[in-house]
Image (cartoon, rainbow, N blue to C red):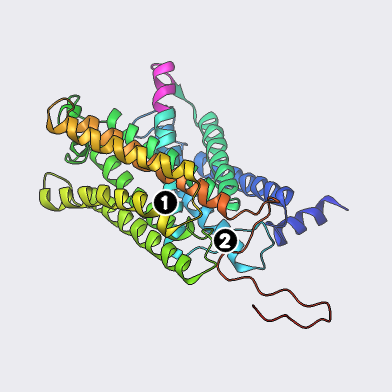
Amino acid sequence: MTAQLRVRQVLRHPFRNAESRESAALLIAAGVLVVATVVSLLVFRGGPLPIAGPGSIGQFVALAAAVTAFGVFIAAVTVSHAGPQDARALPRMRWFDIASIAAAHGVIALLGWIGMANIVERSFFGAVVFPVSAALLAGVAIAVTAYLTTVSAMSMNPTRLSLVLMVFLVVGVFASMLSATDPLWWQKNLSTLGISDDLSALAFNLTVIIAGLIVTTIAHFGTIDIPVDTEKARRGRRVVRIELLLMGVFLAGVGLFPVDTHFAIHNTVASGMAVLFVALVIGLRWHVPGTPRVFLMLGYAFVLIIVVLAVLFTTGYYNLTAVELIAFLIIFGWLMLFLRNTAAAGTGADGGERRTDAVSEPAPSPSGSRTLPQ
């Protein structure tokens, strides 16, 4: 088989197997490398550039990588939905699910490259990058972003979604903390990061809003594998989806309504999210009876910790920032574990995927006719 024929097969069936997906990701990265390098040469023709800051190579790479990640993710998922899917292709997602996860990849690329540029700039203090070298570096960085995004999009599942959520939250929150103009913000509360007009507030509020959108995606995408062999199980899954959906809406509301301008609404949605989390954890054993007991016990322990934190805050032992940070870690840690457990629930004993949206049909009798249910 010639190399040209192999490339054609990859382009026609990029989701056929792991080798095809890897080859497709490399082809996309190669194309992005060429385009990004040429565009960078045109942009950088004015002379040497600083590594970080306004008008720097770091700023250009961050913005270009964010746009690339957003576009590549949407393109990869759209291609997966356009043709026939094999057993390992992507589950079908709704347009706002795709948009929210694509936005998360874009923000991760944006903040990640900005942070890396700042680190490199401090390591090479006062150094500049000449146009040709800057173009090559920018092209490689953007191509790497395209490759990683394509790989992520082509293998998106509840487990990988939990990883995207974790990385997104860590990058976004730390970017907000490091860029905060008030170094003593932690003496007030976590929401203080979102009340100014600088980069810190933008990073915090954007992170919270997109995180809320991702949680609404989890409400659908992360509950597909919950077994629904009976009508009761179907109702239970619906309740879990509604609770997760409301948690996502409330979380997005935390970023949409900053505490300094919408105090009542901000506190209402923040408290509502915590109440929904407690209700979800406590009711999970009835809504999803097959949930592993170890995971249930872990959820109860998390709820107990939140209650203890609330008591310590009311007695003045902890300040609000400490309570919010720990509760934040607990809630999103539980969500990531929830995604992994539901993904495991959708896998049969032999490791293969099993259907959960419909009751299995009765097996045919030896004579070829189907037996009636007992």
Residue reaching furthest to the right: 1
Q: Where is residue 54 in the image (x, y as percent from the top left)?
A: 33, 33
Q: Looking at this rendering, what residue extends furthest in the front direction? A: 374
- Residue at 11% x, 44% y is 260
Q: What residue type is labelled 1?
A: Ala
- The C terminus is located in which quarter? bottom right
Quick check: is 122 in the magenta stretch? yes
Q: Are marks 1 and 2 in contact (CB under 8 Å)?
A: no
Quarter of image, res 317: top left
Residue 84 visible in the shown view: yes
* Position of residue 289 in the picture relative to residue 351 (left or right): left
Instruction: Check disc 1 and report its element: helix, strand or loop.
Output: helix
**Direction from residue 330 to residue 220 in the image, left or right:** right
Identify the main secondary structure in magenta. helix
- Could you say which is closer to the camera, residue 26 or residue 90? 90
Direction from residue 179 to residue 25 in the image, left or right = right
Q: Is residue 271 positioned above or below 41 on the image?
A: below
Q: Distance between the residues labelled 1 and 2?
A: 19 Å
Which percent across, then down, holds residue 309? 23, 33
**Residue underneath mark 2:** 91
Q: Provide the residue span drawn in magenta.
A: 117-127
Q: For label 1, count other residues whose C-alpha is less than 10 Å away and answer few (under 14), some (14-19) or many (20+).
A: many
Residue in the foreground of this view, choosing between 188 and 324: 324
Query: In the figure, 270 relative to 311: above or below?
Result: below
Q: Residue 103 carries which label?
A: 1
